[in-house]
Image (cartoon, rainbow, N blue to C red):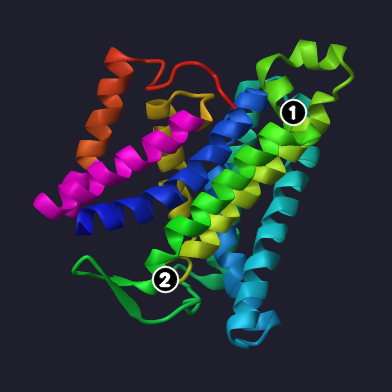
Amino acid sequence: MEILILGLSRGSVYALVAVGFVLVFSVGGILNLAHGTLFMLGAYFTYIYFNFLFGQGGTLALLASYVCAIVSVSLVALLLFFALFRRKIDSISYVMVVSLAFALFVEQFMKVYFGVTSTGVPSLVRGSVDIFGVRVLNKEVLLLPISLFALVALHMFLRHSSAGQSIKAVAQSREGAILVGIKPDRVLAMTIAIAAALAALAGTLISSLVTVTPTVWSYWLIKAFAIAIVGGLGSLPGAVVAAFLLSFVEIATTFTLTDQYGELVALMIIVAILLFRPSGLMSSRQV
């Protein structure tokens, strides 16, 4: 039961980060290596707003810090797109190099102003709850419902809104979308902002759970990339399934062996997927 609960909690955060990464690839055909940085900035902006803007003012101040952090990260992602990505968006190598350079720049910037020590904010809720005999912190319990709400809201947006339909159209065929009057650059910019918001939401949620340092972006980028490979690049349902799959594998291995083996077993699964099913668990592109 403890493995189930912790696996669901960790998997929900993995899913938030990975779905945004896969969504940008599906729509723009690009690999944004700064995606982990957007996650990190979500946590850091929460810390900055809560401590320096709202003066550690309690629950309302913390909620306001979450919202401001998510909006700020989305604006950073849009600035990155219009200032750097847009000029050579058709070049996969250019986007990868530029996004990686941006990630390294932000890491060094954070080291200069915040040092290499970790930062964090208080939890939105305190205490713990007993679930089938397992004592779980309330702040961990919140991860799953908030993440599921965000993912369901994204699904409904893509399925039932005109903007969501334009995202799906560009993901299916860029040329066909142009023929019906859709502007792919605007759609991609909107997609990058949505993906950044999801990554930032994940960052805000874990800002009170784990240590946040300037180098944490690489860990979450690797996780997003690994989940995308396992689930199938371009498949949002595949990313969600793979996120929970890897989470359960890591938690179960950690409980039975050690933390180091958890990462090793997850890596072995990724290698096996690449060898025997290179297209991932759900090979068809699906947004």
Circle nearer the N terminus (2, 1): 2
**Residue sitting at 33 percent across and 15 percent down?**
277
The answer, for residue 107, to whether it is visible in the render is no
Classify 143 as above or below 155: below
| Whole-percent x, y for residue 32 in the image | 59, 35
Q: Residues within 10 Å of mark 2 (few under 14, many from 20)?
A: some
Which picture quadrant has residue 188? top right
Question: Along the line of sight, which residue is nearer the eye, 21 or 169?
Answer: 169
- Give above or below for 15 relative to 174: below
Q: Is residue 4 magenta?
A: no
Residue designated by label 2: 139
Q: Quadrant of the C terminus?
A: top right
Decide if residue 25 is in sight here. yes
Q: Check the picture and name the quadrant holding the N terminus.
A: bottom left
**Where 200 sits versus 278, above or below?**
below
Q: Are marks 2 and 1 in contact (CB under 8 Å)?
A: no
Pick the residue in front: 112 or 92: 92
Residue 162 location, x and y as percent?
80, 33
Amino acid type at circle 1 is Gln
Q: Residues within 10 Å of mark 1 (few under 14, many from 20)?
A: some
Decide if residue 267 is on the left or right side of residue 141: left
C-alpha separation, residue under disc 2 versus residue under disc 1: 35 Å
Is label 2 or label 1 in front? 1
Q: Which range of residues does the magenta coloring cover?
A: 237-263
- Give, as a three-letter code, the residue at label 2: Lys
